[in-house]
Amino acid sequence: MFIDRTDAGRRLLERLPDLDPGATVILALPRGGVPVAAVIARSLGAPLDLALVRKVGFPGHPELALAAVSDGSNPQIAVNRDVARMSGLDQAEIEALAEEQLAEIRRRRELYLKGRSPVPIAGKTVVVVDDGVATGATMRAALRLLRGADPARLIAAVPVAPPDTVAELAGECDEVIALETPEPFGSVGAYYRVFDQVPDAAVSEMLDNHLRSGEADQATQR
């Protein structure tokens, strides 16, 4: 049982391997992953950014994932080939649908990060953090897409996840760190004493605070 997301972040930090802050980027899955990731990034002195991923729904059936698309200067698209074959859509048509979701990603980046450019991750150790996963669908899509951005090492880090999801995520990254793997699982919130919704304003504030603290640290070192 975790007290709250801050407690989860502190405990997760203790399980991370030794990381070079200058060669590491902490990416949070918003919104619940941001308080967890903020603790880790601040303690390490590493950059903090968001892993913004959107599902591209099957036309007429938006709940069915045709593909997923990621944020970044070179957005990546992961296509569900079985669904794509069933849809009859070609690559250009899928990319056109993905562009609609990229617009939403840009809107969210503007909302949360005031339009700041994504932190480059090529050649870096990237730690993708959430407050927990159940099916792991969003984390899996994020890892698959981030792998296309050429990180040196890709780590998924969560406080709690079911064992079968951990096994599935292991195929998408170099390492999965899950503090608790209960079976049967239930829901992520069942493993927190406090599991309130994280408002958009709180996400923006945590990211702004991290950026300001990093700038202050740099100024002190000069």
Image (cartoon, rainbow, N blue to C red):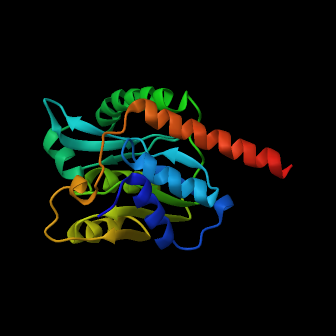
Give left or right: position of 42 versus 222.
left
Q: Position of residue 162 (x, y in %)?
A: 22, 67
Q: Quadrant of the N terminus?
A: bottom left
Quadrant of the rendered image containing residue 135: bottom left
Q: Position of residue 137 (x, y in %)?
A: 26, 53
The residue depicted at 25 percent of the width and 49 percent of the height is 80
Q: Is residue 136 above or below residue 51?
A: below
Q: Position of residue 8 (x, y in %)?
A: 40, 60
Q: Is residue 217 above or below residue 8?
A: above
The residue depicted at 68 percent of the width and 59 percent of the height is 22
Give left or right: position of 166 versus 15.
left
Is residue 3 or residue 31 the one in the foreground?
3
Q: Is residue 63 above or below residue 181?
A: above
Is residue 87 or residue 32 the one in the foreground?
32
Quadrant of the rendered image containing residue 68: top left
Give left or right: position of 119 versus 63.
right
Quadrant of the rendered image containing residue 209: top right
The residue depicted at 55 percent of the width and 28 percent of the height is 115
Q: Is residue 60 above or below residue 34?
A: above
- Residue 122 visible in the picture: no
